[in-house]
Image (tube, rainbow, N blue to C red):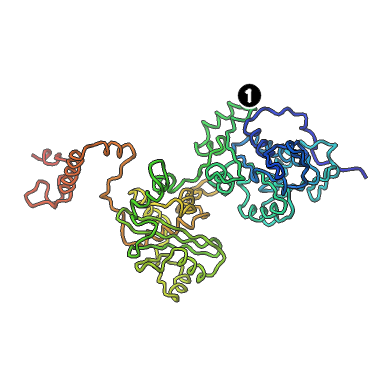
Amino acid sequence: MGRRLPPGCGLDIHKPLLHNPYFLAMQDARRLRKCLVCKSIVSPKSGELQCPVCWKTHTNNTSFPRLFKSLHLRAGRRSGKSLAGSHGVREELSTPGQLWWVCGPTFKILHDATMPALLRLIPVDWVEQWNQDNLELTLRNRSVVQFRSLDDPERGRGQGLNGVWIDEAAFCAERAWHVLSPSLAENAGIAITTTSPGGFDWTYKTFYKRAVTDKVPGYWAAKYKTLDNPLFQQSAVLRREVEEARLTMPPDVFAAEYEGDDVNFTGVIYGQAIDSQVLEASRDQTEEEAVRKHIPEWPHIDSTRKILIGLDSGADHPFGANMVVVTPTGLVVVDEYLERRQAHVTHLSTIQTRFQLNRFSNILWAANKNEAQLRIEFALRGVMVAPAENKHMVGIQRVQSWLHAKQMYFVGSKCPKTIEQMRTYRYADNYQTDGQKRDTETVFKRDDEHPDCLRYICMAFPELPSIDAITMSDREQARWNSLDEQSKLDIERIRAYNKQQLERDLDVNDPGYPVGDMYGGMVSSLFD
Protein backbone atom coordinates (compact mmCIF):
# COMPACT_ATOMS: atom_id res chain seq x y z
CA MET A 1 0.00 0.00 0.00
CA GLY A 2 1.46 3.37 -1.05
CA ARG A 3 1.94 6.29 1.22
CA ARG A 4 -0.96 8.61 1.79
CA LEU A 5 -0.50 12.36 1.29
CA PRO A 6 -2.32 15.04 3.26
CA PRO A 7 -4.81 17.25 1.38
CA GLY A 8 -3.20 20.13 -0.50
CA CYS A 9 0.31 18.89 0.22
CA GLY A 10 3.00 21.04 -1.42
CA LEU A 11 0.68 23.27 -3.45
CA ASP A 12 2.28 26.53 -2.21
CA ILE A 13 5.96 25.60 -1.98
CA HIS A 14 6.77 27.60 -5.13
CA LYS A 15 4.56 30.54 -4.27
CA PRO A 16 6.69 33.72 -3.92
CA LEU A 17 7.06 35.06 -0.40
CA LEU A 18 6.83 38.85 -0.27
CA HIS A 19 8.94 40.90 2.11
CA ASN A 20 7.22 41.50 5.44
CA PRO A 21 9.46 42.96 8.19
CA TYR A 22 7.30 41.54 11.01
CA PHE A 23 7.34 38.10 9.42
CA LEU A 24 11.13 38.20 9.10
CA ALA A 25 11.63 39.55 12.61
CA MET A 26 9.67 36.65 14.08
CA GLN A 27 11.64 34.08 12.08
CA ASP A 28 14.94 35.67 13.14
CA ALA A 29 13.89 35.59 16.79
CA ARG A 30 12.74 31.96 16.48
CA ARG A 31 16.12 30.83 15.16
CA LEU A 32 18.21 32.42 17.93
CA ARG A 33 19.92 30.01 20.32
CA LYS A 34 22.71 30.11 22.85
CA CYS A 35 25.52 27.57 22.62
CA LEU A 36 26.45 26.58 26.17
CA VAL A 37 29.85 25.39 24.94
CA CYS A 38 31.20 28.62 23.42
CA LYS A 39 28.58 30.93 25.03
CA SER A 40 27.69 32.44 21.64
CA ILE A 41 24.25 33.67 20.52
CA VAL A 42 23.78 32.11 17.09
CA SER A 43 21.29 31.19 14.36
CA PRO A 44 22.04 27.60 13.30
CA LYS A 45 21.47 26.39 9.77
CA SER A 46 17.93 25.23 9.02
CA GLY A 47 17.41 21.56 9.91
CA GLU A 48 20.53 21.36 12.09
CA LEU A 49 21.45 21.86 15.74
CA GLN A 50 25.08 22.75 15.10
CA CYS A 51 26.71 25.90 16.48
CA PRO A 52 28.23 27.87 13.55
CA VAL A 53 30.90 29.33 15.88
CA CYS A 54 32.43 26.32 17.67
CA TRP A 55 30.87 23.69 15.33
CA LYS A 56 29.55 21.72 18.28
CA THR A 57 26.65 19.48 17.22
CA HIS A 58 23.90 19.46 19.83
CA THR A 59 21.11 16.93 20.24
CA ASN A 60 18.47 18.90 22.13
CA ASN A 61 17.38 22.26 23.53
CA THR A 62 19.05 21.64 26.90
CA SER A 63 22.60 22.27 25.69
CA PHE A 64 21.49 24.53 22.83
CA PRO A 65 18.62 26.53 24.40
CA ARG A 66 16.49 29.00 22.52
CA LEU A 67 16.67 32.69 23.29
CA PHE A 68 12.86 32.94 23.07
CA LYS A 69 10.41 30.33 24.31
CA SER A 70 7.37 32.38 23.25
CA LEU A 71 6.81 34.09 19.88
CA HIS A 72 3.58 36.05 19.50
CA LEU A 73 2.19 37.80 16.41
CA ARG A 74 -0.83 40.03 16.98
CA ALA A 75 -2.30 41.47 13.80
CA GLY A 76 -5.41 42.33 11.81
CA ARG A 77 -7.30 40.00 9.51
CA ARG A 78 -5.56 38.83 6.32
CA SER A 79 -2.31 40.29 7.56
CA GLY A 80 -0.32 37.12 6.87
CA LYS A 81 0.18 36.12 10.52
CA SER A 82 -0.91 32.51 9.87
CA LEU A 83 1.52 32.35 6.96
CA ALA A 84 4.29 33.41 9.33
CA GLY A 85 3.30 30.68 11.78
CA SER A 86 3.18 27.97 9.10
CA HIS A 87 6.60 28.91 7.65
CA GLY A 88 8.07 28.81 11.15
CA VAL A 89 6.67 25.34 11.86
CA ARG A 90 7.82 23.98 8.48
CA GLU A 91 11.39 25.07 9.18
CA GLU A 92 11.26 23.53 12.66
CA LEU A 93 10.05 20.22 11.20
CA SER A 94 13.12 20.06 8.95
CA THR A 95 15.13 19.20 12.08
CA PRO A 96 15.01 15.39 12.55
CA GLY A 97 12.97 13.83 15.33
CA GLN A 98 10.78 16.82 16.22
CA LEU A 99 7.25 16.53 17.65
CA TRP A 100 5.00 19.53 17.03
CA TRP A 101 1.35 20.35 17.62
CA VAL A 102 -0.62 22.74 15.42
CA CYS A 103 -3.79 23.95 17.15
CA GLY A 104 -6.86 26.07 16.46
CA PRO A 105 -9.69 27.31 18.69
CA THR A 106 -12.29 25.19 16.86
CA PHE A 107 -12.14 22.24 14.46
CA LYS A 108 -13.62 24.40 11.69
CA ILE A 109 -10.87 27.03 11.95
CA LEU A 110 -8.24 24.30 12.26
CA HIS A 111 -9.57 22.40 9.23
CA ASP A 112 -10.41 25.36 6.99
CA ALA A 113 -7.50 27.72 7.67
CA THR A 114 -4.68 26.55 9.94
CA MET A 115 -4.08 23.03 8.55
CA PRO A 116 -4.06 24.08 4.88
CA ALA A 117 -1.66 26.96 5.64
CA LEU A 118 0.98 24.46 6.80
CA LEU A 119 0.23 21.41 4.63
CA ARG A 120 0.44 23.44 1.42
CA LEU A 121 4.03 24.33 2.39
CA ILE A 122 5.18 20.74 3.02
CA PRO A 123 7.06 19.25 0.01
CA VAL A 124 5.68 15.92 -1.16
CA ASP A 125 9.09 14.22 -0.89
CA TRP A 126 9.23 15.10 2.83
CA VAL A 127 6.15 12.98 3.62
CA GLU A 128 6.44 9.48 5.06
CA GLN A 129 2.77 8.99 5.98
CA TRP A 130 -0.46 10.90 6.62
CA ASN A 131 -2.98 9.58 9.16
CA GLN A 132 -6.32 11.13 8.28
CA ASP A 133 -8.13 9.66 11.29
CA ASN A 134 -5.73 11.14 13.83
CA LEU A 135 -4.71 14.18 11.73
CA GLU A 136 -1.05 13.24 12.11
CA LEU A 137 1.70 13.84 9.56
CA THR A 138 4.95 11.83 9.77
CA LEU A 139 7.97 13.01 7.79
CA ARG A 140 10.88 10.97 6.49
CA ASN A 141 13.27 12.58 8.98
CA ARG A 142 11.12 11.17 11.84
CA SER A 143 9.57 14.55 12.65
CA VAL A 144 5.85 14.46 13.42
CA VAL A 145 3.18 17.16 13.42
CA GLN A 146 -0.22 16.54 15.00
CA PHE A 147 -3.26 18.78 14.49
CA ARG A 148 -5.50 19.45 17.50
CA SER A 149 -8.65 21.48 18.08
CA LEU A 150 -8.73 23.22 21.46
CA ASP A 151 -12.49 23.77 21.66
CA ASP A 152 -12.28 21.34 24.58
CA PRO A 153 -9.33 22.58 26.71
CA GLU A 154 -8.67 19.08 28.02
CA ARG A 155 -7.58 18.03 24.51
CA GLY A 156 -4.44 20.03 25.15
CA ARG A 157 -2.96 17.26 27.27
CA GLY A 158 0.18 15.77 25.75
CA GLN A 159 3.79 15.17 26.58
CA GLY A 160 7.23 15.67 25.20
CA LEU A 161 6.45 18.37 22.62
CA ASN A 162 9.25 20.29 20.93
CA GLY A 163 6.87 23.05 19.98
CA VAL A 164 3.29 24.18 19.45
CA TRP A 165 1.70 26.65 17.08
CA ILE A 166 -1.68 28.01 18.23
CA ASP A 167 -3.47 29.92 15.48
CA GLU A 168 -6.14 32.49 16.49
CA ALA A 169 -5.03 31.90 20.05
CA ALA A 170 -7.16 34.68 21.53
CA PHE A 171 -10.27 32.68 20.69
CA CYS A 172 -9.08 29.60 22.57
CA ALA A 173 -9.97 29.27 26.24
CA GLU A 174 -7.12 30.30 28.55
CA ARG A 175 -7.61 26.96 30.27
CA ALA A 176 -6.43 25.25 27.07
CA TRP A 177 -3.06 26.99 27.36
CA HIS A 178 -2.77 26.06 31.02
CA VAL A 179 -3.40 22.41 30.13
CA LEU A 180 -1.09 22.41 27.10
CA SER A 181 1.92 24.44 28.29
CA PRO A 182 3.35 21.77 30.67
CA SER A 183 3.81 19.53 27.60
CA LEU A 184 6.58 21.88 26.44
CA ALA A 185 8.59 21.71 29.65
CA GLU A 186 10.22 18.32 29.11
CA ASN A 187 12.00 19.38 25.90
CA ALA A 188 12.25 23.13 26.64
CA GLY A 189 9.83 23.59 23.76
CA ILE A 190 8.72 26.75 22.01
CA ALA A 191 5.24 28.26 21.64
CA ILE A 192 4.28 30.20 18.51
CA THR A 193 0.97 32.04 18.86
CA THR A 194 -0.69 34.04 16.09
CA THR A 195 -3.99 35.83 16.55
CA SER A 196 -6.31 38.68 15.79
CA PRO A 197 -6.92 40.64 19.00
CA GLY A 198 -9.97 39.73 21.04
CA GLY A 199 -9.85 42.83 23.21
CA PHE A 200 -7.51 42.74 26.18
CA ASP A 201 -7.77 38.96 26.15
CA TRP A 202 -5.64 36.35 27.90
CA THR A 203 -3.07 36.25 25.07
CA TYR A 204 -2.47 39.97 25.52
CA LYS A 205 -1.54 39.41 29.17
CA THR A 206 0.21 36.06 28.74
CA PHE A 207 2.31 36.75 25.65
CA TYR A 208 2.16 40.34 24.32
CA LYS A 209 2.33 42.30 27.57
CA ARG A 210 5.13 40.14 28.96
CA ALA A 211 7.21 40.71 25.83
CA VAL A 212 6.51 44.36 24.99
CA THR A 213 5.56 46.02 28.28
CA ASP A 214 7.14 43.89 30.99
CA LYS A 215 10.24 42.94 28.95
CA VAL A 216 10.27 39.41 30.41
CA PRO A 217 13.28 37.45 29.08
CA GLY A 218 12.30 34.67 26.69
CA TYR A 219 9.21 36.45 25.33
CA TRP A 220 9.02 38.05 21.86
CA ALA A 221 5.97 39.76 20.33
CA ALA A 222 4.97 42.13 17.57
CA LYS A 223 1.75 43.82 16.48
CA TYR A 224 0.96 45.13 13.01
CA LYS A 225 -1.88 46.15 10.70
CA THR A 226 -3.58 44.47 7.76
CA LEU A 227 -2.17 47.15 5.45
CA ASP A 228 1.35 46.13 6.50
CA ASN A 229 0.83 42.92 4.53
CA PRO A 230 2.85 43.31 1.29
CA LEU A 231 -0.11 41.97 -0.70
CA PHE A 232 -2.19 44.99 0.34
CA GLN A 233 0.69 47.36 -0.29
CA GLN A 234 0.94 46.13 -3.88
CA SER A 235 -2.78 46.00 -4.66
CA ALA A 236 -4.97 49.10 -4.96
CA VAL A 237 -8.04 46.85 -5.01
CA LEU A 238 -7.20 45.33 -1.62
CA ARG A 239 -6.39 48.74 -0.16
CA ARG A 240 -9.79 50.06 -1.31
CA GLU A 241 -11.40 47.09 0.44
CA VAL A 242 -9.77 48.12 3.71
CA GLU A 243 -10.78 51.76 3.25
CA GLU A 244 -14.36 50.69 2.57
CA ALA A 245 -14.32 48.70 5.81
CA ARG A 246 -12.99 51.78 7.61
CA LEU A 247 -16.00 53.80 6.42
CA THR A 248 -18.67 51.17 7.04
CA MET A 249 -17.53 49.45 10.25
CA PRO A 250 -17.83 50.84 13.79
CA PRO A 251 -14.44 52.38 14.69
CA ASP A 252 -13.71 49.92 17.49
CA VAL A 253 -14.49 46.89 15.27
CA PHE A 254 -12.30 48.23 12.47
CA ALA A 255 -9.47 48.93 14.93
CA ALA A 256 -9.51 45.31 16.09
CA GLU A 257 -10.14 43.59 12.77
CA TYR A 258 -7.80 45.60 10.53
CA GLU A 259 -5.53 47.66 12.78
CA GLY A 260 -4.73 44.83 15.19
CA ASP A 261 -5.57 47.07 18.16
CA ASP A 262 -6.77 45.77 21.51
CA VAL A 263 -10.18 47.29 22.12
CA ASN A 264 -13.23 46.32 24.12
CA PHE A 265 -16.09 46.13 21.65
CA THR A 266 -19.05 46.30 24.02
CA GLY A 267 -18.09 49.31 26.10
CA VAL A 268 -15.29 49.70 28.58
CA ILE A 269 -16.55 50.79 32.01
CA TYR A 270 -13.56 52.44 33.70
CA GLY A 271 -10.92 52.22 30.98
CA GLN A 272 -8.49 55.14 30.83
CA ALA A 273 -9.89 56.64 34.03
CA ILE A 274 -7.63 54.12 35.79
CA ASP A 275 -4.40 55.24 34.11
CA SER A 276 -4.04 58.60 35.85
CA GLN A 277 -4.80 57.03 39.24
CA VAL A 278 -1.99 54.46 39.25
CA LEU A 279 0.78 55.37 41.68
CA GLU A 280 3.98 54.25 39.98
CA ALA A 281 7.51 55.35 39.22
CA SER A 282 7.97 58.17 36.70
CA ARG A 283 10.72 60.50 35.55
CA ASP A 284 10.01 62.84 38.44
CA GLN A 285 9.53 60.41 41.32
CA THR A 286 9.79 56.85 42.54
CA GLU A 287 6.71 54.78 43.26
CA GLU A 288 7.39 55.12 46.97
CA GLU A 289 7.39 58.91 46.70
CA ALA A 290 4.12 58.83 44.73
CA VAL A 291 2.41 56.71 47.39
CA ARG A 292 3.73 58.87 50.25
CA LYS A 293 1.77 61.83 48.95
CA HIS A 294 -1.27 59.94 50.23
CA ILE A 295 0.23 57.63 52.88
CA PRO A 296 3.27 59.51 54.30
CA GLU A 297 4.48 56.54 56.34
CA TRP A 298 4.46 54.11 53.36
CA PRO A 299 5.31 51.23 53.16
CA HIS A 300 4.70 50.78 56.91
CA ILE A 301 1.03 51.75 57.18
CA ASP A 302 0.00 53.35 60.49
CA SER A 303 -1.97 50.84 62.53
CA THR A 304 -4.60 53.46 63.42
CA ARG A 305 -5.68 54.01 59.82
CA LYS A 306 -9.09 52.90 58.57
CA ILE A 307 -8.75 49.73 56.45
CA LEU A 308 -11.34 48.42 53.97
CA ILE A 309 -11.31 44.81 52.75
CA GLY A 310 -13.48 43.83 49.77
CA LEU A 311 -14.24 40.15 49.08
CA ASP A 312 -15.57 38.36 46.02
CA SER A 313 -16.08 34.63 46.45
CA GLY A 314 -17.44 31.97 44.14
CA ALA A 315 -17.11 28.29 43.33
CA ASP A 316 -16.74 28.82 39.57
CA HIS A 317 -14.12 31.59 39.63
CA PRO A 318 -11.19 32.68 41.83
CA PHE A 319 -11.71 34.14 45.29
CA GLY A 320 -10.68 37.79 45.18
CA ALA A 321 -9.84 40.34 47.84
CA ASN A 322 -8.53 43.91 47.93
CA MET A 323 -7.07 45.99 50.73
CA VAL A 324 -7.85 49.71 50.69
CA VAL A 325 -6.48 52.42 53.00
CA VAL A 326 -8.70 55.43 53.75
CA THR A 327 -6.70 58.67 53.57
CA PRO A 328 -7.57 62.40 53.54
CA THR A 329 -6.95 62.42 49.79
CA GLY A 330 -9.13 59.41 49.02
CA LEU A 331 -9.09 55.62 48.87
CA VAL A 332 -5.77 53.93 48.11
CA VAL A 333 -5.81 50.30 46.89
CA VAL A 334 -2.61 48.89 48.40
CA ASP A 335 -2.84 45.10 47.93
CA GLU A 336 -4.70 42.27 46.24
CA TYR A 337 -5.42 38.56 46.58
CA LEU A 338 -6.66 36.12 43.93
CA GLU A 339 -6.72 32.35 44.47
CA ARG A 340 -9.05 29.48 43.65
CA ARG A 341 -10.18 26.06 44.89
CA GLN A 342 -9.71 26.62 48.61
CA ALA A 343 -12.07 26.65 51.57
CA HIS A 344 -13.31 29.99 52.90
CA VAL A 345 -11.37 29.54 56.13
CA THR A 346 -8.16 29.01 54.16
CA HIS A 347 -8.79 32.17 52.15
CA LEU A 348 -9.42 34.11 55.36
CA SER A 349 -6.21 32.96 56.98
CA THR A 350 -4.15 33.72 53.88
CA ILE A 351 -5.71 37.17 53.42
CA GLN A 352 -5.10 38.09 57.07
CA THR A 353 -1.47 37.03 56.76
CA ARG A 354 -0.83 38.61 53.36
CA PHE A 355 -2.42 41.95 54.31
CA GLN A 356 -0.91 41.86 57.87
CA LEU A 357 -4.34 42.65 59.27
CA ASN A 358 -3.40 41.75 62.85
CA ARG A 359 -1.74 45.20 63.04
CA PHE A 360 -4.98 47.09 62.47
CA SER A 361 -7.95 47.64 64.78
CA ASN A 362 -10.26 49.64 62.50
CA ILE A 363 -11.18 47.27 59.66
CA LEU A 364 -14.35 47.14 57.56
CA TRP A 365 -14.93 43.88 55.67
CA ALA A 366 -17.44 43.93 52.79
CA ALA A 367 -18.90 41.30 50.44
CA ASN A 368 -21.98 40.64 48.31
CA LYS A 369 -25.07 40.68 50.51
CA ASN A 370 -26.09 37.33 48.98
CA GLU A 371 -22.90 35.61 50.20
CA ALA A 372 -24.51 34.36 53.41
CA GLN A 373 -22.26 31.31 53.71
CA LEU A 374 -19.11 33.43 53.51
CA ARG A 375 -20.38 35.80 56.21
CA ILE A 376 -21.30 32.89 58.48
CA GLU A 377 -17.94 31.15 58.15
CA PHE A 378 -16.00 34.39 58.64
CA ALA A 379 -18.18 35.34 61.63
CA LEU A 380 -17.42 32.01 63.31
CA ARG A 381 -13.79 33.10 63.26
CA GLY A 382 -14.45 36.53 64.63
CA VAL A 383 -14.61 38.48 61.36
CA MET A 384 -17.85 40.33 60.71
CA VAL A 385 -18.48 41.02 57.02
CA ALA A 386 -20.80 43.87 56.00
CA PRO A 387 -23.41 42.85 53.40
CA ALA A 388 -22.97 45.19 50.42
CA GLU A 389 -25.58 45.99 47.76
CA ASN A 390 -24.86 43.76 44.75
CA LYS A 391 -26.61 45.64 41.93
CA HIS A 392 -23.95 46.19 39.31
CA MET A 393 -25.09 49.54 37.93
CA VAL A 394 -25.40 51.14 41.37
CA GLY A 395 -22.01 49.86 42.49
CA ILE A 396 -20.31 50.81 39.22
CA GLN A 397 -21.64 54.36 39.54
CA ARG A 398 -20.27 54.55 43.09
CA VAL A 399 -16.81 53.45 41.94
CA GLN A 400 -16.99 55.86 39.01
CA SER A 401 -17.77 58.72 41.40
CA TRP A 402 -14.51 58.05 43.27
CA LEU A 403 -12.57 57.81 40.00
CA HIS A 404 -14.19 60.91 38.52
CA ALA A 405 -13.29 62.85 41.65
CA LYS A 406 -9.75 61.45 41.30
CA GLN A 407 -9.89 60.16 44.84
CA MET A 408 -9.27 56.46 44.22
CA TYR A 409 -5.67 55.36 43.69
CA PHE A 410 -3.83 52.10 42.94
CA VAL A 411 -0.31 51.21 44.04
CA GLY A 412 1.14 49.91 40.78
CA SER A 413 3.54 47.24 42.02
CA LYS A 414 1.18 45.92 44.71
CA CYS A 415 -2.01 45.39 42.71
CA PRO A 416 -1.18 44.77 39.01
CA LYS A 417 -4.05 42.30 38.54
CA THR A 418 -6.53 44.80 39.96
CA ILE A 419 -5.32 47.50 37.59
CA GLU A 420 -5.52 45.16 34.60
CA GLN A 421 -9.01 43.94 35.47
CA MET A 422 -10.26 47.48 36.10
CA ARG A 423 -8.94 48.60 32.71
CA THR A 424 -10.62 45.74 30.84
CA TYR A 425 -13.86 45.59 32.85
CA ARG A 426 -16.64 46.08 30.33
CA TYR A 427 -20.32 45.79 29.57
CA ALA A 428 -21.58 42.65 27.87
CA ASP A 429 -23.26 42.71 24.47
CA ASN A 430 -26.61 44.32 25.21
CA TYR A 431 -28.40 43.03 22.11
CA GLN A 432 -30.34 39.83 21.66
CA THR A 433 -29.94 37.56 18.63
CA ASP A 434 -32.96 39.21 16.95
CA GLY A 435 -31.36 42.64 17.27
CA GLN A 436 -33.54 43.90 20.10
CA LYS A 437 -31.91 45.65 23.04
CA ARG A 438 -32.17 43.99 26.44
CA ASP A 439 -34.03 45.84 29.17
CA THR A 440 -31.19 45.52 31.68
CA GLU A 441 -27.56 46.17 30.82
CA THR A 442 -25.11 43.63 32.24
CA VAL A 443 -21.36 43.37 32.61
CA PHE A 444 -19.10 40.82 30.94
CA LYS A 445 -18.56 38.24 33.70
CA ARG A 446 -14.91 37.34 33.22
CA ASP A 447 -11.84 38.60 35.08
CA ASP A 448 -14.11 40.72 37.26
CA GLU A 449 -13.10 39.62 40.78
CA HIS A 450 -11.20 42.79 41.73
CA PRO A 451 -13.74 45.21 40.20
CA ASP A 452 -16.39 43.42 42.27
CA CYS A 453 -14.25 43.72 45.42
CA LEU A 454 -13.93 47.48 44.95
CA ARG A 455 -17.63 47.75 44.13
CA TYR A 456 -18.53 46.11 47.45
CA ILE A 457 -16.05 48.31 49.31
CA CYS A 458 -17.55 51.50 47.88
CA MET A 459 -21.11 50.34 48.62
CA ALA A 460 -20.32 49.39 52.24
CA PHE A 461 -18.10 52.38 53.04
CA PRO A 462 -20.46 55.05 54.47
CA GLU A 463 -18.80 58.01 52.74
CA LEU A 464 -18.73 59.58 49.30
CA PRO A 465 -15.83 61.37 47.62
CA SER A 466 -15.50 65.04 48.43
CA ILE A 467 -16.81 67.14 45.55
CA ASP A 468 -15.10 70.22 46.99
CA ALA A 469 -11.76 69.05 45.68
CA ILE A 470 -10.95 70.81 42.42
CA THR A 471 -9.47 68.40 39.90
CA MET A 472 -7.20 69.84 37.22
CA SER A 473 -5.72 68.45 34.05
CA ASP A 474 -1.94 68.36 33.67
CA ARG A 475 -2.10 71.57 31.63
CA GLU A 476 -4.29 73.32 34.22
CA GLN A 477 -2.02 72.10 37.01
CA ALA A 478 1.03 73.49 35.21
CA ARG A 479 -0.69 76.90 34.82
CA TRP A 480 -1.66 76.87 38.51
CA ASN A 481 1.89 76.05 39.55
CA SER A 482 3.20 78.96 37.49
CA LEU A 483 1.16 81.49 39.53
CA ASP A 484 2.71 83.39 42.42
CA GLU A 485 1.42 82.76 45.94
CA GLN A 486 -0.59 86.01 46.10
CA SER A 487 -2.47 85.16 42.90
CA LYS A 488 -3.27 81.69 44.25
CA LEU A 489 -4.60 83.19 47.50
CA ASP A 490 -6.80 85.66 45.56
CA ILE A 491 -8.29 82.90 43.42
CA GLU A 492 -8.97 80.66 46.42
CA ARG A 493 -10.56 83.61 48.28
CA ILE A 494 -12.90 84.25 45.32
CA ARG A 495 -13.81 80.55 45.14
CA ALA A 496 -14.60 80.47 48.83
CA TYR A 497 -16.76 83.61 48.56
CA ASN A 498 -18.68 82.24 45.56
CA LYS A 499 -19.30 78.97 47.34
CA GLN A 500 -20.54 80.79 50.42
CA GLN A 501 -22.96 82.83 48.31
CA LEU A 502 -24.31 79.75 46.58
CA GLU A 503 -24.90 77.92 49.86
CA ARG A 504 -26.42 80.85 51.80
CA ASP A 505 -30.08 80.42 52.74
CA LEU A 506 -32.42 83.09 51.37
CA ASP A 507 -33.82 85.72 53.71
CA VAL A 508 -37.48 86.83 53.60
CA ASN A 509 -36.42 90.14 52.06
CA ASP A 510 -34.21 88.53 49.35
CA PRO A 511 -35.49 88.72 45.75
CA GLY A 512 -37.12 85.49 44.67
CA TYR A 513 -37.71 84.21 48.24
CA PRO A 514 -38.23 81.32 48.98
CA VAL A 515 -37.02 79.49 45.82
CA GLY A 516 -34.58 82.04 44.47
CA ASP A 517 -34.40 83.75 41.10
CA MET A 518 -34.07 80.60 39.01
CA TYR A 519 -34.41 82.46 35.71
CA GLY A 520 -31.55 84.87 36.35
CA GLY A 521 -33.60 88.07 36.76
CA MET A 522 -36.02 87.39 33.90
CA VAL A 523 -39.03 86.64 36.12
CA SER A 524 -39.21 90.02 37.82
CA SER A 525 -38.78 91.86 34.52
CA LEU A 526 -41.68 89.96 32.96
CA PHE A 527 -44.14 91.02 35.65
CA ASP A 528 -42.93 94.55 36.39
Q: Nearer the viewer, residue 519 or 478?
A: 478
Question: For the view shown, which residue lies furthest in the bottom direction?
Answer: 380
Q: What residue do we see at 41% from left, 52% from top?
A: 410
Look at the image and tell me whether residue 167 can be seen. no
- Give residue 202's position: percent from left, percent from top: 57, 49
Left or right: 231 in relation to 277: right
| Quadrant position of the C terminus in the picture | top left
**Amino acid type for the residue under numbered disc 1:** Ser
Q: What residue do we see at 49% from left, 53% from top?
A: 417
- Give residue 92's position: percent from left, percent from top: 74, 41
| Quadrant position of the N terminus in the picture | top right
Look at the image and tell me whether residue 502 can be seen. yes
Q: Nearer the viewer, residue 215 or 232?
A: 215
Left or right: 46 in relation to 459: right
Residue identifier under label 1: 235
Question: For the view shown, which residue lies furthest in the left direction?
Answer: 509
Q: Nearer the viewer, residue 294 or 389?
A: 294
At mark 1, the secondary structure is loop
- Give residue 73's position: percent from left, percent from top: 62, 39
Left or right: 136 in relation to 152: right
How many marks can you see? Answer: 1
- Give residue 109's position: percent from left, percent from top: 68, 44
Q: Residues within 10 Å of mark 1 (few under 14, many from 20)?
A: few
Q: Nearer the viewer, residue 473 or 135?
A: 473
Left or right: 29 in relation to 401: right
Q: What residue do we see at 80% from left, 37% from top?
A: 9
